[in-house]
Image (cartoon, grey):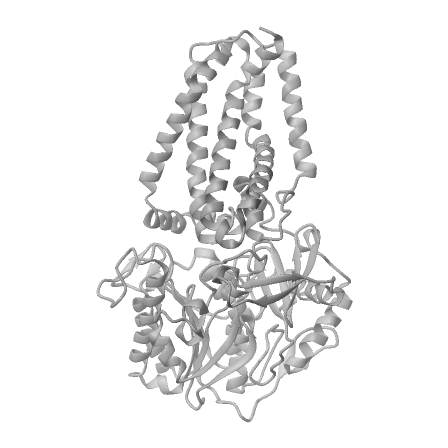
Amino acid sequence: MPASQVLLSRFRPLLLIAVAYLLLSGALRAALWYRFGLEAGVSGAQLPLVLMLGTIDDTVELVYLLAPFALYLAVLPQAWYAARWQRPLLGFATYVALFGATFLNVMEYFFFEEFDARFNRVAVDYLVSPHEVLGNISESYPVVPIAAAAAVVGLGLWLALWPALRRGLEAKAAPLGARVRLLAAHFGALLLAIAVWPTDALALFQNRVANELVANGPSSFFNALRTNGLDYSAYYRTGDSVALTRLLRADLAGSGGTFVSENGLTRRFPTRDDGLGRLNVVVLAEESFGAEFVGAYGDARGLTPEFDELAKQGVLFRHVYASGTRTVRGLEAISASLPPIPGDSVVRRSGNAAVVTWGEVMQSLGYHSSFLYGGYGYFDNMNEYFAANGFDVSDRRDIATPSFANIWGVADEDLFRHAIEYFDRRAQDGAPFFSIVMSTSNHKPYTFPAGIPGVPERGGGREAGVRYADFAVGQFFREARKHDWFGNTLFVVVADHGARVYGSAEIPMYSYEIPLLIVAPGLAPRQVDALTAQVDLAPIVLGLLGLPYEAPFFGRDVLHYPDPDRVLMFNHNQKVAICRDGELAILGLRRSESTVRHRYDPARPRRLRDVYEPMPRDAALVDLATAYYQVGTDMFDHGSYR
């Protein structure tokens, strides 16, 4: 046998695993294209290029994944390699690799189904709370049958490959020098990949979903893991901090208040004579309650009769956008009125104690501030963040006998009953209270209490989640009306984010639309067409109350300072953006930047409703985006968001 064949025989297990991995990854890519890519505008004509580029990405990732195996095969002495115990060991290791690749592909499919993306920052964030995540997976998916099927497929692949693998194990000895040279070539390729091949090297399409199809899942995951605690200045576009702060001050100046210093962002807002006064404030933050499901925002399915009726009694904001696609992004925007800076939300970041929050401002005005959550508040660091920033915290541990619970928390009805009891105690204390109440029910596995009209106990999916969330909101208001404090309370109903990110756009704005409703005594029902961001909630409510305060909030009181050209801020995975007058400036890793023009096309399918058109680079808009995100990051990192 020629020396080259002897050498390749030694590495045959590695080569066979690589071939199987490429075949499995190609099959997954084709399945993802058929199920999700077509509806996102990835045509059949583009599929061959997607598969080709994806195979290149998969091959580069194999250089990483197979490096330990290559090292083992290269340095293993021939006597050990030829030993009787080696054959079952390599055979079993090969089977485990094939099973793992098969099972991981299935998990990638379900992840793509939920997030329209390969493994990304969400996957990394979820690893921090394995109890909830593994519980959610076990309750949402048939994990045992999936694992069994993956085991069978892995076994089938192993049986097909075993004859070739066995011939490699029976081959003559490969010279150590040749093995070392081949290993050196492998690790040279590894170093080259590290140096010059980023995860998105082949993201050549204008369509975001097409680029996600090309991407390799493990590579995307490890990239998200590597950049999870990223340093903004090392990865994103930057500029002169003094000039950017000046630019940001000029942009914020039209949203009211008086700057308290010559170079900071903190503004002083005086008492308003037209304010409602020291009302209690209750914010119902509704999980995944996107505007696309709400009748008051044009949906015709009848999923939200309770909210739609409430909308006739309060101030309904017609054009509201969330900051991101995760609960922590929504809570960050609502509680701190801060841009969704790249990397972790400030809720999850170290050093997040004593930042300026809505709760701290209300506390300074004599309010009792609280955060009530239906799950365990250690998830996403919520308890620690809120407790360190002016809020009393109460979570699932304080709800003694819930009528129903799943892995994410108690039923919304139980949470709201707990909230009403909590407010009863606060009302007895005599001081006004302010509370953010975060629900959990509208989330996979979509399991609910029995006996709710139109809501099956399980199997109803997202629509059942919306119906149940709406039902519980109605129950909350009916019960709250029976309590003395109801007539002295301003209520807010708002979503933490939309249901999920859809479509081909880098920043799919349609997916970020959420409802916002304010109901309060003395507040005449009406609809507000002003462009509104989630970060605006604290300034809006404080403006309605008319109470004096100081804060460096980035949001705008759109009721008193509307501006059709105001800036909206968005975060999606590792990209951030601002939108002004239909134009977006998008900032990404490796200091990338782009500007596009955005419009909605209501005639297109919902997932393709965002239409982005190329435009000449708008330097002023890019500079303003840099100002929002660099200054926002610096203020948090340097402790000046105080």
Q: Nearer the viewer, residue 469 or 436?
A: 469
Which residue occupies 65% across, 72% down? 581
Q: Nearer the viewer, residue 364 or 278?
A: 278
Q: Quadrant of residue 60?
A: top right
Residue 490 is situated, as x and y percent measured from the top left of the image, at 43, 82
Q: Is residue 193 left or right of residue 169?
A: right
Q: Quadrant of residue 424?
A: bottom left
Residue 342 visible at all: no
Which residue occupies 52% across, 42% down? 217
Q: Is residue 244 left or right of residue 365?
A: right
Q: Is residue 268 above or below residue 178?
A: below
Furthest toward the bottom, the residue is: 273
Q: Which quadrant of the rendered structure holds the N terminus? A: top right
How many marks the image carries: the answer is: 0
Which residue occupies 65% across, 12% down? 177
Q: Which quadrant of the rendered structure holds the C terminus? A: bottom right
Q: Nearer the viewer, residue 257 or 609?
A: 609
Q: Is residue 573 above or below residue 52?
A: below
Q: Is residue 1 above or below residue 389?
A: above
Residue 226 visible at all: yes
Residue 251 is situated, as x and y percent measured from the top left of the image, at 69, 75
Q: Is residue 484 left or right of residue 232?
A: left
Furthest toward the front, the residue is: 45
Residue 349 is situated, as x and y percent measured from the top left of the image, at 56, 57
Residue 491 is situated, as x and y percent measured from the top left of the image, at 42, 79
Q: Is residue 479 left or right of residue 504?
A: left
Q: Is residue 525 above or below residue 250?
A: below
